[in-house]
Amino acid sequence: MELGKIWVPHNRLLLSILGAATFVLLSVGIYFSNLSTQPKQVTLVIDGVSQDITTTAKTVEQLLQEKQIQITDKDSIKPGLDTSVEKAMTVDLQTSWAIPVQIAGQKTVVHTTKRTVAGALADAGVKVSQKDKINPSVDSKLTKDTEISVIRVEEKAVQVNKDIAFREIRQKDTSLNKGEVRELKKGQAGKAILHYSVVFENGKEVSRKLVKTDVVTEKQDRVLAVGTKKQEVMAASLPSRGGKDIRAKRVLNNVTLTAYAPNAGGGYGRTAMGVKATVGKTVAVDPKLVPLGWWVYIEGIGYRRAEDTGGAIKGHKMDVYLGSESEAMRFGRKKGYKVHVIGPKLP
C-alpha cells in the first residue's frame, strides 16, 4: 500500500514533465516551419539584368519553377539548383548563347554562357596566337548576334634560288671598222639565294618580304669591243667610156624596170625636162631619188639619162624609153636590177 501511494505522485510528475517537453518541441517545430514558409526577398540576375523578387520557394530550383523560368543543361546557375533559398541571397543565371565561329574558313557553333569573345573561344576549345586575326577582338563583349571569325596567320622563312643576269658592256674600239663587234669576255650568270619572310593567312600566301640575299656565285659581265673606225668607201667601177674610167656616186639595188614608147597621138614627144625623148638615152625616174639630168648606168641595159618622170614611177622604179609600143609590151616588168647613179655629166 505504501509503495503504491509513493509511485502515483511520481508518475504524475513524470507525465507532466513529458507533456511540457512535447509542447515545447511542437512549438519550436511550428515556429521554424512557419519561418521557412515566410516570403523572402532575393535578387535574381538573368544575363546581367537583376531584379528583386519575393519568394516562398525553399530551393533555387523551386524559385525558377515559381517564376516559370526554363533552363537547359548548357545554362549556368549559381548557386546550384538544390541550394536552399535564403533571405537577401543572389541567384545568378547565365543563359547559353549559340555563337557562330569561323576558324580558318571552317564554320562551327559554340554554346557558351561567357559574354566575351575570349570566353566563347575558350568554351569552343579554340586556341589563338598573337599573330592570328580575330574579329571582333578577344576582349569584345558578346551579343546574341555576334559572329566570330578567326584567321590563322603564319609566318615562314622561304628560300628561293635565283640566277643573277649579267650585263653587256660595250667598249668603243678605234681599231675595228664601224659596225664590227668583237667579244672580249664571255658573260656568265651568277647564282644567289633570296631569303623571304612569307606571311600566310588560312594557308594562303598574302605577303612576301625580302630579308636578305646571299650571293653564291658572282656574275661575270660580257664585254664587247664595238668598232668606230670609218671605212674608206670605194666608188663602183663601171665600164670605161672612151678610154676613161667612170665611177658612180651611189648604187641603187633591187630596182624595178618598165618601158614606155611614143603613142599614136605623139603624147610622149617631150619629157619632163622639156627635151625630146630619145631611144637609148631617156629614162623616167623618181626625182627624189635621182635628180633630173643625171646619168645612170643600168646593169644589163647600159647608160641612160634621167630626163622624164611618171605618176607610177616612185622609189626604186624606172621607166625605160623605147621606140614602139610593141617593144615596150615585150619589155614588160623586170625586177632586181642594179643601177649606178653617176651624176650630171657623163665623161
Image: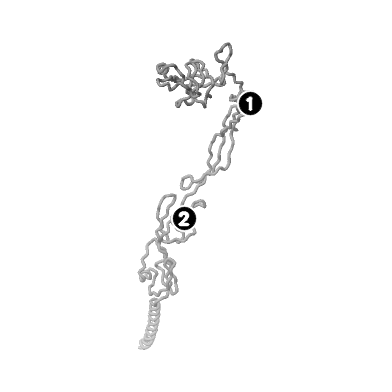
Q: Is residue 45 above or below residue 301?
A: below
- State the mark number for residue 256: none
Q: Position of residue 268 (x, y in %)?
A: 44, 22
Q: Nearer the viewer, residue 64 or 132?
A: 132
Circle 2 sits on which residue?
135
**Upstream in sequence: badge 1 or badge 2:** 2
Q: What's under tag 2, amino acid-wise?
A: Asn
Give the x, y percent position of residue 225. 61, 26
Mark 1–mark 2 distance (CA, rounded to whole Å): 68 Å
Residue at figure coordinates x 47%, y 26% from the top left: 314
Quarter of the image that includes the C terminus: top right
Residue 173: assigned label: 1
Q: Residue furthest top?
A: 243
Return the residue nearer the eye: 50 or 289: 289
Secondary structure under tag 2 reads strand
Asked whether the beta carbons under mark 1 and mark 2 sit within 8 Å of each other, the answer is no
Q: Residue at x 48, y 44 (%)?
A: 205
Of the 4 image quadrants, the one containing the N terminus is: bottom left
Near mark 1 (Cα within 10 A), the count class, few <14, some 14-19 or many ≥20, is some
* Image quadrant in which you'd find residue 332: top left
Q: Amino acid at mark 1?
A: Asp
Residue at 60%, 26% in the rendered image = 226
